Amino acid sequence: MIPYLKEAIGNLFKPSVTSKFPEKPVETPKNYRGRISFNADQCIGCGMCIRVCSPGAITKTQKPVEGGQEITMEFDLSSCTFCGMCSDFCPKKTITLTGDSQMVELDKNNFKVSGSFIKKAPPKPAPPPSRTIKRIMTILLLKLPGDRRTCKIPPPRLLPLDCV
């Protein structure tokens, strides 16, 4: 016990070996994988990031709105392993890993990064013409102006038509 006491008293009069946090900002190396940044304006909502995220830190919620869907992507940094797979596989490069290494928070909600955007619904195709309209168009095309011939076309089931 005496050697430890001697060491403790000797260290009381020496300058500090460590520095106070944060005395100066820490410079992170190039390609450091820190806090996630998400640009919702460029996202297309493909969900590729969700498929490649092994800890399941990315969630996608869809809510129907007028003219499409509101899609919200949420990244839980407390579950994230910062592997960068989501950033690598994103086709529009909307997910990036910043150089922010200072991720000390008191509130766990500050570890959530989210963004919302509206995905427009695709336009609805025009309905196909009905059978009766097709039949009338066929008759009109067969009877040309100035043509005195008559044609007998079997009438459709719903509407009897004769071309005279």
Image: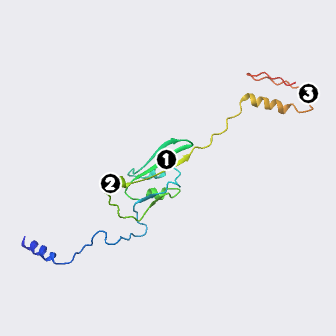
Q: Amino acid at mark 1?
A: Ile
Mark 1 or 2: in front is: 2
Marks 1/2: CA distance? 25 Å
- SS at badge 1: strand
- SS at badge 2: loop
- Indicate the position of residue 108 as horizontal and vertical percent values: 33, 53
What residue is disc 1 on?
71
Specify whether 151 is left or right of 96.
right
- Indicate the position of residue 38 as horizontal and vertical percent values: 46, 56
From the viewer's side, name the closer residue of 56 and 18: 18
The answer to which of marks 1 and 2 sits earlier in the sequence is 1
Examine the rendered structure and indicate whether residue 96 appears above or below residue 5: above
- Image quarter hosting the C terminus: top right
Marks 3/2: CA distance? 88 Å
Tell me, yes or no, whether the two marked residues, 3 and 1, touch with CB atoms within 8 Å: no
From the viewer's side, name the closer residue of 74 and 150: 74
Q: Amino acid at mark 2?
A: Asp
- Indicate the position of residue 125 as horizontal and vertical percent values: 65, 39
The answer to which of marks 3 and 2 sits earlier in the sequence is 2
- Indicate the position of residue 99 as horizontal and vertical percent values: 41, 65
Task: Check residue 149 in the rendering and tell me which mark sits there, or answer none.
Answer: 3
Crowd tier of the residue under label 2, counting other residues whose Cα lies within 10 Å: few below 14, some 14–19, many 20 or above: few
Specify whether 61 is left or right of 79.
right
Specify whether 103 is left or right of 72.
left
